[in-house]
């Protein structure tokens, strides 16, 4: 006789745990499966957690030690081989305790915090247990099959919260193979005393910084971006690159990480650091066409499993979307439970609410930009280098043979000449137009 | 490193920072893997090549350059070997293989890689 519960959740990440918490509070029997030793033990993200949804349910989270630093600086830079052109935004006027709802975090810490909240509400967490597939009977999902003796668990609803690779969504027939637009995130957590971090990045107390490096010298001009986020006494340093671009580049991901760390600009920020942990994980960036269906008979798909990310380096969001989708899934399931109907039709309000929310809207808007970028490799292979070169031309303080200095007018002309000769006004204009078009729709 | 400065205000000189001004420590692939806790399910590979014949005909072999822990190696006889015990379970090989020739699943519960930071 197989075990029974109301809701079986595969995964114990942020989306899973917040859903489990709400369902258990609503009086349902919830089992959450985690394949690792503890929630977060197999999870990795770049490092900034956006806490709008989280703070609504767990207003005390900042004091719980589950996050690292609140971000007060977002910095975007373009790298050439040895120069940098950067734009920094510092925001010092957001109020505690949530500031700008942007906190650096580590998943092995944060996921455990949130899963504990679900357990306290009554959800059952089963660790060290892999779920290989959904049990499908007469076209509807009726439970999950865990890889252990007597591992069949029947449930009214299964929540596929098993992240980017979502084998559960696939086994339930909700999506096909993952495309090469999926991004590989590669990272190291490196240690440095907190006082040194605060001094080096100009931070006071628990303030943190988020640096993004767009294309150019960060990842050999490929479509991708490097990042550097300050934690309490560690720094998360790494990059993301679509699998298709990585394949074309033909360089080992671990070597590419060392190369990024040793970029003359990045190296200076990482002086004295010691690697504590290497990691790599997929970011499910894909077209709407490649996304899974969010709902089937007896199943909903949330978070990374549903492809809900905004991988644009301006924003880099995902865990917040996972939590939002977890909330909407749980609320829909509570309604379905009342009605005693768990068909795809009864669960459909989850999908429609999702599509009205920021999670879908932001995904949809920025995946459009990503599609445009895929056909414009020059945004990564050319412009970061060229714009940096322009800055170098303009700001070069050059002596002349007669012991004087090159006048600014000459430098300006050199810049104008470079724009015309190397960049081409026409192609630059067309590219900007393409960005504007992609951003408008 | 910090020079002793006799400032009029008598601000103390900085000590200790010199320890953190050297170049960042870099790790090679083996040492990167060594930063992780990996419990190997001896004798039960979770990754397998389905058909070596397919690998022999594969020209690009993208698995060998995209695996973040370099677990795919082409042997002298042309066969592809997966050094699966170092796997960090990302899923790249599963997607990158043009022929879907890798039987891919997660290590059994309690095995495989564990992040302490993540």
Image: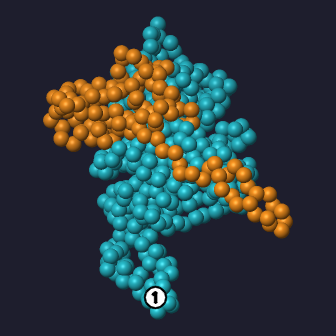
Q: Quick one: label 1, few (<14), some, or many (20+) residues within 10 Å?
A: few
The answer to which of A146 and A396 lies nearer the viewer is A396
Q: Position of residue A241 (x, y in %)?
A: 39, 49
**Residue depicted at 55% across the width and 20% down the height:** A126
User: For residue A59, which quarter of the picture?
Assistant: top right
Q: Residue at x 36, y 17 (%)?
A: B44
Residue sitting at 37 percent across and 79 percent down? A419
Q: Is residue B29 left or right of residue A229?
A: left
Q: Residue furthest right?
A: B9
Provide the residue designation for mark 1.
A400
Estimate the x, y position of residue B50 in percent, counting from the top left: 24, 25
Number of marks present in the image shown: 1
Circle 1 SS class: loop
Which chain contains the residue that carries disc 1?
A
Q: Residue furthest bottom?
A: A402
Q: Colour of chain B?
A: orange
Residue A22: percent from left, percent from top: 62, 32
Coordinates of residue B31 in the picture (x, y in percent): 46, 35
Colouring used for the render: by chain
A113 relative to A196, above or below: above
Q: Is residue B93 above or below residue A1?
A: below
Q: Residue at x 43, y 21 (%)?
A: B40
Res A94 seen here: yes
Farthest residue toward the top?
A1
Q: Is residue A239 left or right of residue B51?
A: right
The chain coloured cyan is: A
Is residue A342 depicted above or below A14 in this figure?
A: above
Q: Is residue A351 visible?
A: no
Q: Nearer the viewer, residue A23 or B20?
A: B20
- Relative side of A421 to A151, left or right: left
Q: Nearer the viewer, residue A125 or A235?
A: A235
Q: Quadrant of the rendered structure where residue A284 is?
A: top left
């Amino acid at each position: 006789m197989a075990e029974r519960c109301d809701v079986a959740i595969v995964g114990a990440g942020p989306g899973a745990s917040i859903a489990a918490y709400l369902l258990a509070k609503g009086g349902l029997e919830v089992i959450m499966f985690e394949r690792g030793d503890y929630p977060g033990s197999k999870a990795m993200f770049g490092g900034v957690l956006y806490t709008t949804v989280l703070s609504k349910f767990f207003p005390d989270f900042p004091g719980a030690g589950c996050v690292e630093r609140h971000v007060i600086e977002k910095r975007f830079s373009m790298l050439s081989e040895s120069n940098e052109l950067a734009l920094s935004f510092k925001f010092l006027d957001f109020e505690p305790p949530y500031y700008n709802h942007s906190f650096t975090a580590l998943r092995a810490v944060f996921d455990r915090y949130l899963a504990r909240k679900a357990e306290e509400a009554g959800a059952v967490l089963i660790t060290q247990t892999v779920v290989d597939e959904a049990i499908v009977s007469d076209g509807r999902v009726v439970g999950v099959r865990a890889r252990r003796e007597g591992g069949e668990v029947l449930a009214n609803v299964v929540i596929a919260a098993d992240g980017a690779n979502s084998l559960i969504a696939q086994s339930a027939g909700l999506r096909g193979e993952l495309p090469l637009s999926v991004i590989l995130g590669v990272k190291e957590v490196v240690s440095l005393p907190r006082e040194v971090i605060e001094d080096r990045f100009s931070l006071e107390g628990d303030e943190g910084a988020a640096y993004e490096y767009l294309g150019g010298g960060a990842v050999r001009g490929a479509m991708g971006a490097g990042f550097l986020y300050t934690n309490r006494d560690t720094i998360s340093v790494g990059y993301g690159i679509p699998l298709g671009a990585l394949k074309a580049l033909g360089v080992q991901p671990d070597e590419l990480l060392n190369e990024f760390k040793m970029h003359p600009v990045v190296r200076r920020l990482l002086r004295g650091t010691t690697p504590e942990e290497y990691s790599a994980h997929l970011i499910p960036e894909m077209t709407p066409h490649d996304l899974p269906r969010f709902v089937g008979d007896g199943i909903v798909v949330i978070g990374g499993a549903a492809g809900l990310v905004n991988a644009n380096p301006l924003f880099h969001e995902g865990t917040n979307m996972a939590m939002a989708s977890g909330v909407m899934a749980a609320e829909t399931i509570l309604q379905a439970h009342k009605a005693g109907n768990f068909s795809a039709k009864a669960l459909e309000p989850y999908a429609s609410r999702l599509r009205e929310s920021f999670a879908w809207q932001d995904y949809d808007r920025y995946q459009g930009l990503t599609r445009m970028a895929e056909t414009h490799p020059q945004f990564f292979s050319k412009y970061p280098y060229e714009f940096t070169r322009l800055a170098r031309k303009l700001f070069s303080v050059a002596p002349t043979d007669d012991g004087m200095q090159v006048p600014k007018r000459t430098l300006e002309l050199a810049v104008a000449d470079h724009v015309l000769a190397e960049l081409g006004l026409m192609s630059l204009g067309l590219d900007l137009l393409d960005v504007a078009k992609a951003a408008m729709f | 490193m910090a020079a002793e400065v006799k400032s009029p205000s008598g601000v103390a000189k900085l000590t200790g920072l010199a320890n953190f001004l050297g170049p960042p420590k870099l790790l090679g692939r083996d040492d990167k893997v060594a930063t992780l806790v990996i419990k190997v399910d001896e004798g039960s590979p979770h990754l397998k090549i389905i058909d070596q014949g397919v690998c022999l005909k594969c020209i690009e072999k993208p698995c060998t350059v995209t695996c973040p822990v370099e677990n795919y190696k082409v042997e002298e006889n042309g066969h592809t070997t997966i050094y699966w015990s170092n796997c960090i379970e990302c899923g790249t090989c599963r997607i990158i293989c043009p022929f879907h020739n890798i039987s891919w699943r997660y290590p059994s519960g309690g095995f495989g890689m564990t992040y302490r930071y993540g």
